[in-house]
Image: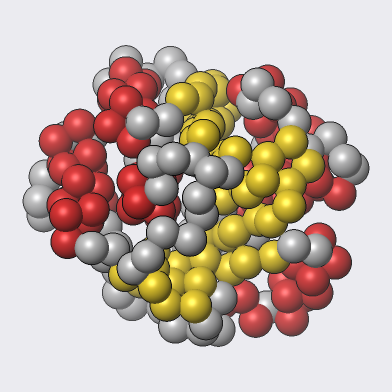
Amino acid sequence: MEYSQKKTLVGLKCAVIVAHPDDETLWAGGTVLMNPDNDWTIITTCRKDDPDRAPKFFDALDALDAHGGIGDLDDGPDQVPLRTQQVQQTVLSLLAERAYDLILTHSPLGEYTRHRRHEEVAEAVLQLIESHQLQTNKILFFAYEDGGRDYLPRPIQSADRSILLPRDIWDRKYQIITQIYGFQDNSWEAQTTPRTEAFWSFCSIGKIRERIKERSVVK
């Protein structure tokens, strides 16, 4: 496991692909803020028509010094399964380019128990890479778990990469969650906001599929 407070991703073209506005900040906002020399594209597949969350997402992009877009996939409380092709089309429609040095996205097994849209986005990204519709040198999956709802999501101890955020970076990340997105200090989102960001790191799709099959990504 790599454990660092230093910049490790310098001068790269990076894409952060998430399901909801605020996911980008919760799970990877510190990593984005610590690497301002990178070209950050951030997209979210849901909530384009949300009059509250959508404009806040673009304010968050400004705070993260990133650019990106937002899709309108269904995000209703019933979490009706979406077709992978539909999620793929949304992802591609929001990305201006098809090749990135680094892609950060949800774990195929999610970050907590349970949100179907997170898992669907991860699977869509994987299949896009497998079919060569999207290219990357490395993919980082968010590595968090909640013990089956026993506690708030926390970094997985065995993750490949763990980054302890400097206090000033975490403060800026927390301000995006509470001041831009407007979550109260006692909200799930604010209490969850991790000081340590953790990722599974892969350069090979085969290795990803192998890890998922073994379910070791959640251990």
Q: Position of residue 59 (x, y in %)?
A: 29, 24
Residue in view at x 50 percent, y 35 percent: 40
Q: Quadrant of residue 186?
A: bottom left
Q: Position of residue 135 (x, y in %)?
A: 78, 42
Q: Position of residue 13 (x, y in %)?
A: 60, 38
Q: From the viewer's perspective, is residue 24 above or below residue 162? A: above
Q: Nearer the viewer, residue 101 or 162?
A: 101
Q: Quadrant of residue 61?
A: top left
Give the total of numbered labels.
Answer: 0
Q: Nearer the viewer, residue 143 or 118?
A: 143
Q: Position of residue 7 (x, y in %)?
A: 41, 59
- Location of the C terminus by quadrant is bottom right
Residue in view at x 64 percent, y 26 percent: 95
Q: Is residue 4 visible?
A: yes
Q: Quadrant of residue 51?
A: top left
> By what rule are the colours in the image chosen?
secondary structure
Q: Is residue 117 visible?
A: no
Query: Is residue 150 left or right of 136 when viewed as pictured?
Result: left
Residue in view at x 66 percent, y 30 percent: 91
Query: Is residue 135 left or right of 94 when viewed as pictured?
Result: right
Query: Is residue 81 left or right of 66 when viewed as pictured?
Result: right
Residue at the limit of the structure toward the right, as seen here: 131
Q: From the viewer's perspective, is residue 70 above or below residue 39? A: above
Residue in view at x 40 percent, y 34 percent: 21
Residue at the limit of the structure toward the left, as seen here: 185
